[in-house]
Image: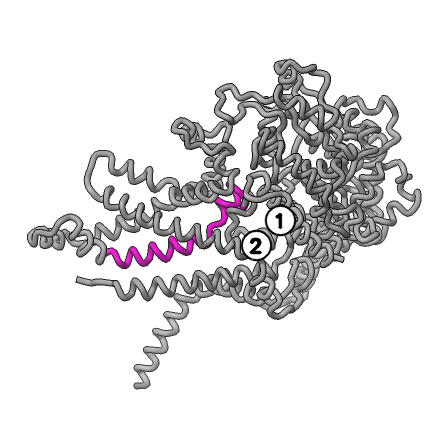
Amino acid sequence: MRLTRRTCIAAGAALALTAGLAACSDGGSTDDGGPVTLTMWHGLTGPDGPAFQEVVDNFNDSQDEVTIEAEALPWDSLYQQFLTAATSDDGPDLVAMSASRLPQYAERGVLAPTDDFYADDTYMDTSVLAEGAVQASVFDGVNYGVPLNLGPVLMYWNKALFEEAGLDPEAPPTTWEEFEEMIPDLTVDEDGDGTPEQYPIAMGDHSTVPVFPSFLWNGGGGVVSDDGTTSLLGDPATVETAEHWVNLVREEQITPVGMSGADSDQLFQAELAAITINGPWMTAGLTEAGLDFDVTVPMAGPEGQSILGDVVSMTISQRLTDAEKDAAFQFFAYWESVESQATWANGSGFPAIRTDMPGDAVTNEWAAVFGAPEVLDNVRPYLTGVPGSGEINEDIFTPALQSALNGTGEVADLFPAAGEQIQAILDDGS
Amino acid sequence: MRIGRTVAGRQARAAWMFLAPGLALLTLFTAWPLLRTAYLSFTEYSLLTPPEWVGLANYRELIADDQVMNALQNTVIYAVVVTPVTIALALALAMALNAKFFGRGIVRTAVFVPFVVSLAVVSIAFRFLLDPNYGLVTHWLDGVGLAPTQGALAQPGTAMAAVMAVGVWKNVGFYMVMFLAGLQSIPRDLYEAAQLDGASRLQKLSTVTMPLLSNQTMLVSILAAIASFQVFDQIKVMTNGGPAMSTETLVVMVNRVGINNLEFGYGSAVSVLLLLLILLLSMAQYFYFGRKQVRY
């Protein structure tokens, strides 16, 4: 084809138009003060998803400068897809992730610090946020996130099963001793085959919220020290506490062995266990199932009553420009506002992250229970700020615990040996 | 000569052109990932940052790693049990279903169907069947006093047996069809000749059927062994390698260290170990069956 002047102009115009369209399709992010569009991935695919989206929609409607395009993915898929997305320019601008996962990405330079958000009152007064939730995203002295939610892990009890057992349905155990006294009443072995049909408690030992480590805390031990430098699995207090609970499982059969978190939830929901320990995400399903249940702080151990806190943080990609980072911080401040936190708490049952919520703002009864001051004051995140936290929990602690629960080894041998492996990871990470 | 070379050249060119699409796909999806994995096994690579050359460090770590030894042991146990059991069962089913009887087609389909069902679906279904509280299989086992108290998948002693049983059930239909094709290609007159010579059923099996099935047996053995060494999805879904890593095979471990721990370099080294194992096994099988091959 012969190239004429007209053809060249048309081709040039088409090229310019294509380039313009391509620029528009790139989220419309600009560095010149124009509107900014940020993509965000999160894993709130349950009943909490609509509450989060409502706040995002409210934010987008409240102004014209910043648009958040939020996409919900199951957590597993999110982490897997983010692996490849993080290395390309097509990845999300903002990602919500469990605070315990955050160091894995932060130490490899994938995430940008959010210290500027907390530096002064430019965006908000961050001192009103629950301290435990804010500190959960600190890695190596730098904060890489802003809390999206805080899920205290509390004790659920089935009031109907307590009543059937002849116990006061309004008096759940407040200490380990009280719980142990209730074991015979809450265990039902109708056919006498030695395997209960109803268990006192439902506890998963893998793919679950780390309930067992919180028992270790309250017995004076733990998996890793709070500063993330020392393994505690070999400590006498840890070994003694672990032996105590492993014996209760093996000898008293307080819970089936080998359950995942989902199996444990199912057991409690099927009214085959009287107690379980879980986060606020479980209330919606249990209410829908018509269970007669209530929630309170977990029973205290001899050395304390720390409450496990599951924190999800909003993080930002390291490739964001200053304008985009500013836009992200505007959204974070909006998310943490009283109005948004009320929308979130009332819609999801999660507690508000702010500690200064007006008394009448939170009308959801579960959000009020999970957000009670005595709960938030005792919340303790697990393995946050620790590089290799996934490997420590999934590859070392969980197999050691499972071996002990299955009777293929003894706590006194398994835990110190696992502790040495954890220490090697901690030393390597430092 | 000149004409001959030209013709040969044209034929070769045509052959290469016909082969090119297949070779391109093979290079893209097999050769390149293989070479890339071999390269990455000498690096520290998290996917999030560029690979960093570490020489033989990953292999030195691998040799001393108890988790690798555990996964290798589990892989070998799985392969050593599942491969012969699957082959023997597939052969027995093929011989049984080669005979004419009413409803043969339905039985053949029933045996083959598990192979075409997604392994993830099969695994989830078996998790329910083996559930200690609601499982149908647990209920049946309970009836004869064999039900594990904690559920088959929750105990290290029974979890591997459960995933192996599912592995056999899932794949036996596919290998049965391969044996069935082989059986149907054996000329009837050989059996008639053997009959005339007064051969018993066992003698017909050992002197006619098995020698003439040697090609199928070799193929099925290699495929079944490779499939056993590469077992992944059913374990990932049913036990995720647990409890206490008692069902973690090499491929499940590769997935764990790569995807969960972002140690793609180390995961690649474990993959290379698995590749070498399968290569050695396949060569041994090839030479063994090559010597036993019979033609009449």
Residue sitting nearer the eye, B189 or A371: A371
Q: CA distance from mark 1 to mark 2?
A: 9 Å
Q: Position of residue A233 (x, y in %)?
A: 70, 46
- Label 2's element? helix
Predominant SS of the magenta segment = helix
Please name the amino acid that badge 1 sits on. Asp
Q: Residue furthest bottom?
A: B1
Asked if A290 appears above or below B257 in the picture, the reply is: above
Taking the magenta stretch, the answer to whether it contains residue B236 is yes
Q: Mark 2 falls within which chain?
A: B
Q: Residue at x 15, y 48 (%)?
A: B201
Q: Residue at x 48, y 20 (%)?
A: A191
Disc assigned to residue A185:
none
Q: Which residues are magenta?
A: B213-241
Q: Is residue A95 visible?
A: no
Quarter of the figure that contains the C terminus of chain A: bottom right
Q: Position of residue A177 (x, y in %)?
A: 71, 26
Q: Is residue B233 left or right of residue A110?
A: left
> Are the residues tagged 1 and 2 within 8 Å (C-beta)?
yes
Callout 1 and callout 2 share a chain: no
Q: Mark 1 falls within which chain?
A: A
Q: Position of residue A415 (x, y in %)?
A: 65, 46
Question: Which colour scheme appears in the figure?
Answer: one colour
| Residue wearing tag 2 | B67
The crowding category of the residue bearing disc 1, from other C-alpha atoms within 10 Å (few below 14, some 14 to 19, many at least 20), is: many
| Residue wearing tag 1 | A395
